[in-house]
Amino acid sequence: MSKKAFVIGHPIAHSRSPLIHGTWLKTYGIDGSYEAIDVAPEALPKFFDRLRAGEFVGGNVTIPLKEPVFALCDTIDPLARSIGAANTLVARDGKISGSNTDYLGFLGNLDQNAPGWSDGLGSAIVLGAGGAARAVLVALAARGINTIHVLNRTAEKAIGLSDEIEGPLQGHGLEDFARLAPEAMLLVNTTSIGMHGSAFPNLPLNLLQKSALVTDIVYTPLETPLLAQARALGLATVDGLGMLLHQAVPGFAAWFGVTPEVTPALRAAVERTLGH
Ligand code: ATR
């Protein structure tokens, strides 16, 4: 029987996941489908009934359902719990398990585009303390980075998050960047700054080490002002599109039994939908 997977969210029309999974289904000649389904939060229990009844092998979950699915899943993986969001569901024998692959997406992107980036990495700076920061912080802690500084416009949120998530985390305000930058080997932006070309007003990237890596999880535009500034200073950069592609890998593998590859052709296909 043809296997069916989905991405649910509300709204869902903008999702690139059908393109990513659809490309892989074709590439690997798998008899399956992956469709975007608009599910409002109040319709989630009914959708779970369909899932439990065996209509789908599983699927992805996006805004605003990443947290509401917790209450309906039979099991939630501990990492998803510490991130506070599940983006991948697997249905087996009427039981639904939820996991979070965003942190693997973050790691997979850097591993592919900056191999060895975490070897001996002493100090990292993460900008932002929202939902996206959680997955990045869990990922960095899992890689054994010595010190992870979380910097946020609202310093209290950064401090709260660094207390909550396990690992060598320290919370600060954005104004501490200049003091912490000279030690940092990695800078990650997880805030919404960069979208549509917005920029941090005062972030002296020139204070980072010359061998530092700068990465952004914003991918619209592909080269955010932060990445452009880093590149102009001769720093290594990795854009955020790879995180979107890599977070899709574990779900596809679980549903369809093939671990798919993130290729330049897949990236180009998604890039074409970003208006570049
Ligand atoms: P997400 O789930 O995408 O992380 P979020 O939880 O709303 O979204 O978090 C947005 C992050 O971007 C926060 O860290 C936010 O800082 P505050 O906690 O101070 O609000 C940050 N952010 C958004 N707009 C910003 C701006 N103009 N300047 C600095 N930080 C900003």
Image: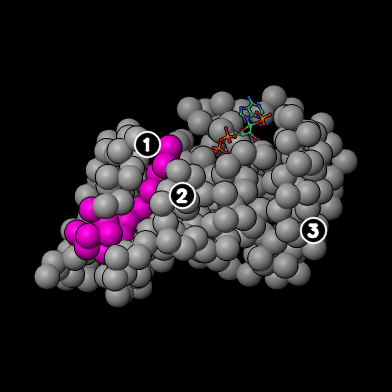
Residue 157: x, y in percent?
Answer: 73, 36
Q: Which mark is residue 41?
A: 1
Q: Which residue is rendered at x = 76% and y = 69% of the image?
A: 120
In this picture, residue 46 sits left or right of residue 175: left
Q: Earlier in the sequence, mark 2 or mark 3?
A: 2
Q: Which mark is residue 71?
A: 2
Residue that protrudes farthest toward the right in the picture: 179
Foreground label between 2 and 3: 2
Q: Secondary structure at mark 2?
A: helix
Count neighbours of disc 1 (C-alpha within 10 A) and say few if under 14, some if 14 to 19, many if 20 or more. Answer: some
Residue 221: x, y in percent?
Answer: 46, 36
Amino acid residing under circle 1: Pro
Front-most of 128 and 3?
3
Residue that protrudes farthest toward the left in the picture: 1
In this picture, residue 159 sits left or right of residue 255: right
Front-most of 98 and 231?
98
Front-most of 109 and 222?
109
Where, quadrant-wise, is the C terminus in this rendering? top left
Residue 118: x, y in percent?
Answer: 67, 66
Amino acid residing under circle 3: Pro
What is the magenta range?
Answer: 50-65
Viewer can see residue 13: yes
For the residues labelled 3 and 1, the Cα–Cα distance comes to 35 Å
Where, quadrant-wise, is the N terminus in this rendering? bottom left
Foreground label between 2 and 1: 2
Q: Which residue is rendered at x = 38% and y = 48% of the image?
A: 61
- Residue with the mark numbered 3: 168
Amino acid residing under circle 2: Ala
Q: Which residue is rendered at x = 52% and y = 63% of the image?
A: 77
Is 143 covered by the magenta stretch?
no
Task: Establish if 44 lies above or below 111.
Answer: above
